[in-house]
Image (cartoon, rainbow, N blue to C red):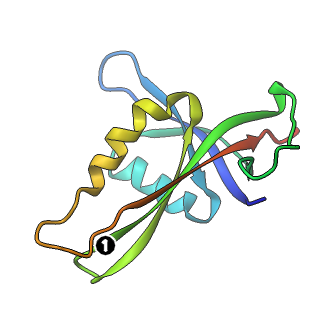
Amino acid sequence: MAKEKVVRCRVSKNGGGPPAESVRFVPLEVFDLWKHLMVTRHGFEIVEEQVSLWFDIDGDPHVSYSEADYEKVLRLSMWVYSDRDRMFRKIVRYFPEADYAEIRPAFLSHYEKPRNHSRFAARIEERRGVWVKAKA
């Protein structure tokens, strides 16, 4: 069973109308950089940061948590070829399972197949998991 430290936060942007808000799950190891870019470059506000663990539940049928103890979060992993670096790199992102079908096409549109490159391969792996709510 895989487990990873992940930050759950709320992201909002007020563009003059009602704020558009969503939940994001970001690996702890890159959270500070991600937050800095979201705030300074994209103008978002990041609130309600909470660190806990994401567990892969695809491989363990014995996992059982009460509904109040976790949120269902899907991990998407894929390898994409970088023309700049001339090598493959792994992309890993976390999405609320309930919103995944809507978010997936928009996310994948950022990683279009490069022109004139025969070695492009976007092998996509989706793993169901849970983000366990930390006790206060």
Quadrant the N terminus occupies: bottom right
Left or right of 86 in this view: 98: right
Q: Residue 135: x, y in percent?
A: 88, 39
In the displayed image of the protein, which residue is found farthest to the bottom? 86
Residue wearing tag 1: 81
Label 1 residue SS = strand
Q: Nearer the viewer, residue 100 or 46?
A: 100
Q: Nearer the viewer, residue 60 or 39?
A: 60
In the displayed image of the protein, which residue is found farthest to the top? 18
3 is higher (above) or lower (below) than 129? below
Dot 1 amino acid type: Tyr
In the displayed image of the protein, which residue is found farthest to the left? 116
The picture quadrant where one finds residue 67 is: top right
111 is higher (above) or lower (below) than 12? below
Dot 1 crowding, Cα within 10 Å, few <14, some 14–19, many 20+:
some
Judge whether residue 12 can be spotted in this image. Answer: no
Quadrant the C terminus occupies: top right
110 is higher (above) or lower (below) than 67? below
Q: At 67% from the left edge and 35% from the top edge, which residue is drawn?
A: 72
19 is higher (above) or lower (below) than 104? above
Q: At 66% from the left edge and 53% from the top edge, which residue is drawn?
A: 6
Q: Residue 101: x, y in percent?
A: 45, 32
Q: Residue 10: x, y in percent?
A: 56, 35
Q: At 47% from the left edge and 38% from the top edge, which residue is drawn?
A: 45
